[in-house]
Amino acid sequence: MTEKGYDLPKFAELPVAEDTKVESVFDTSEKRIGRVLERTPQELAQEMWDIFQDIKSSWVQFVRAHEVEEETTTTSETETSSKKTKKESISFHALFDESNPIAAQFKKSPTFKALHPKLRALYSNPTVRVVWEKGMRAHASQWEKVNGTWEEYRAVEKEQSALETRYDILQKEQFESRAKPSAARRRTLTNDIAEVELALLENRGVLEALRQKSPDLAAEILSAELEQRRRELQGHDHFMWTASRRAILEMLETRAASKETLRLVVLEGQAGTGKTSFARALARKFTGNDLVEVGVGGRTKAERALFADETLDKEHPTVYRSLLQAITGKRAPDGAVEHHGRVAFLDEFNKLDNDEAGIVATALDGMRVGEKTGYHLLGADANDRVQGGALVIAAQNPAGTRFLNRTKFTPEVQRKLDIFQLDYFPQSADNPELYEAFLVSLMDQDGRIQAKRKELAPAWVPNSIKNTAGVEIGKKDELVTNSKKGGALWRITQMLHESYENLAKRKNILTDANPDAYIQGRVLPPGDVMKWLQGYRKELNKGVSLEYYLSNKFKNWIDSSFTADHDQEDKRLYLTLAEEYGLIKKAGAEYKTLPPAKISMDILTQRDIAEMSPRVPRTMIVEETEARPPELTRAVVDWTTPDGFEHHRLEIRYKPLDTPITRRIPGSPPDAPTYVALGTINECLRVPAVVGRLYWVKS
């Protein structure tokens, strides 16, 4: 990010080693011409960026390796320290220094010989070069505007990450110390955790305040956050620790670490809220081990299915089931302790009746970590000890009309459970977690999205911002709430959110029209849609629009999910929602998918992706709120000459007028918006075509 646009031309023009063959990617050989001609200048410019980053990364690794090699040849500790300091000062710009010996060695490396000719060939194409330089200038301009505050954010964000890690470590220590409690250490841990909680709360407030400083900074911050979510989703657990999930994690950590009994923790939520995936990710994050998943229900009694069962083997008459294995670390009463406890997970817990659930809850509530289980049924050894890493989590759907086969537990059973509510990802203008999760699902390994921007983004309408004198001093785009406005990704997000509100019996678009319109059966969970979006990458070469793709996926889901007679009302409600949000169309009594459409794809960077989220404000506003500007002011203009060459951040000084006037920027299209001119701008009048935005700022 810190590299400027003018680095590449100098870099691209570096001489190639004599023994390196330059193969142009723009040759017209029969083998390559078809592929090359299909690629747009934007795609080729993006390839330049990728090669550029690969060379930079290789340069850093080469310098580090050179440091190690040089340091091993020194004998004096002082010399080593001096040598290391010297090598650390070698930046990427040193590659341009012909007298630098390390740069000379790097240019002879296989990596440089392989990548640099490709970079030069791409740069030799004038069309691709214009696209590249435009992007680099915009990139450098954005960085200049946010650099200082961005560094401030990075410092706070780094501290925040360290605090979260520290919090998890302290909670894990407190969790593991339940088996061998030290009163003094537990008091210290409690105080340490409280201090970290306060620091986390304060830091989160600071981060939120920094977001509000400028749209540019908000976009940079969100870009970093989405990249972290991408790494999590594409990582081992395939689970994103969004803000809502992190909040539940911290509550569960507090509950698990502070209780010495195995009192059952229950995650309650609608189908598809991610209870199982959350438990799996929590187990690995909290204990470092995989989750032990335990089935419940069926004809087998809870004790035999979960705790222990008798066998026909005379030498080993009793075996431990998964739950008792996770608690004791043993496979049988006469077996050895194989581990120090695991996180066990009981899915669909309220499929048990009140009696069986009560037996499980009572047994766990009576077990204390580090002490004897006291469980002696079916041949179990009551003297077995509860291991320090043992934790039991259950999941259940809320009992009611949607889940008729779920038990509504009696107050006596509920008193022995710790129930946490797990909802779907929140979705609002201030907190669009669901939409951002879908954006992350579309990102590739490099953090980019290949799709049409207008198919992803919500719709916005510009509103004027006026000062106390009624003069327009800027614009602030407002999010459009109309259900048919915005791209297909935004519309399906809103549609799903309304369906989830309906399932939770909250105010929603369906009940606004009919108070009794509630979905009773199947739900379309976020995870299914995320899989659809990940599959969309396979359609890229076909140029299939995302809108058509999602319309087909949704219609296929409808046709395969609602086949029984009792499903038809739910089917009608889902189709009503989809039509309302423009994802299908109604032709007479039939609902049909949207017509196919082939489109050209955009390659969206992480910054482009972040800017689509409603969390990034769309504001163009002056710093002055008074009608008259200060004596020393300047205008910062983005403009383009008639030959298409763009200039960025041109500064024009002017004098204040007694009366502000409104005028159109010279050279702008007839339908372009007018801007407030707070002073004379003769310099601007001499610019042949000003087509960008005019910002008024202090000098």
Image: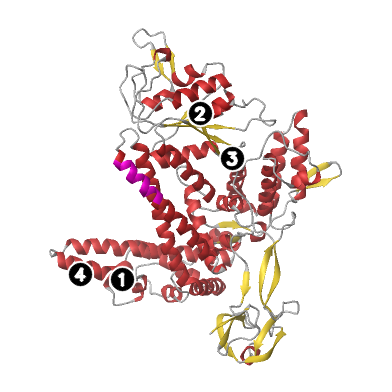
Q: Are marks 4 and 2 in contact (CB under 8 Å)?
A: no
Residue labelled with disc 1: 90
Please tell me which residue lies in front, 129 or 230. 230
Which of the numbered marks, if any, corresponds to residue 82? 4
Tag nearer the camera, 1 or 3: 3
Q: Report, in whole angstroms, how far the alpha carbon at label 3 lies from the one at label 2.
A: 24 Å
Q: Earlier in the sequence, mark 4 or mark 2?
A: 4
Name the amino acid type tagged 1.
Ile
Task: Note whether residue 52 is visible.
Answer: yes
Residue labelled with disc 2: 416
Tag nearer the camera, 4 or 3: 3
Magenta residues (range): 184-194
Q: Residue at x 31, y 63 (%)?
A: 62
Quick one: quadrant of the N terminus?
A: bottom left
Q: Would residue 684 appear left or right of 105 to someone viewing this image?
A: right
Q: Is residue 76 magenta?
A: no
Tag nearer the camera, 3 or 2: 2
Q: Is residue 188 magenta?
A: yes
Tag nearer the camera, 2 or 1: 2
Name the amino acid type tagged 4.
Ser
Residue 594: image x %, image y %? 75, 49
Above or below, comparing residue 515 to residue 364 in the picture: below
Name the amino acid type tagged 3.
Thr
Which of the numbered marks, if any, corresponds to residue 273? 3
Q: Earlier in the sequence, mark 4 or mark 1?
A: 4
Q: Would residue 113 appear left or right of 673 to someone viewing this image?
A: left
Name the amino acid type tagged 2.
Lys
Q: Report, in whole angstroms, how far the alpha carbon at label 4 lies from the one at label 2.
A: 64 Å
Q: Report, in whole angstroms, how far the alpha carbon at label 4 lies from the one at label 1.
A: 13 Å
Q: Earlier in the sequence, mark 1 or mark 3?
A: 1
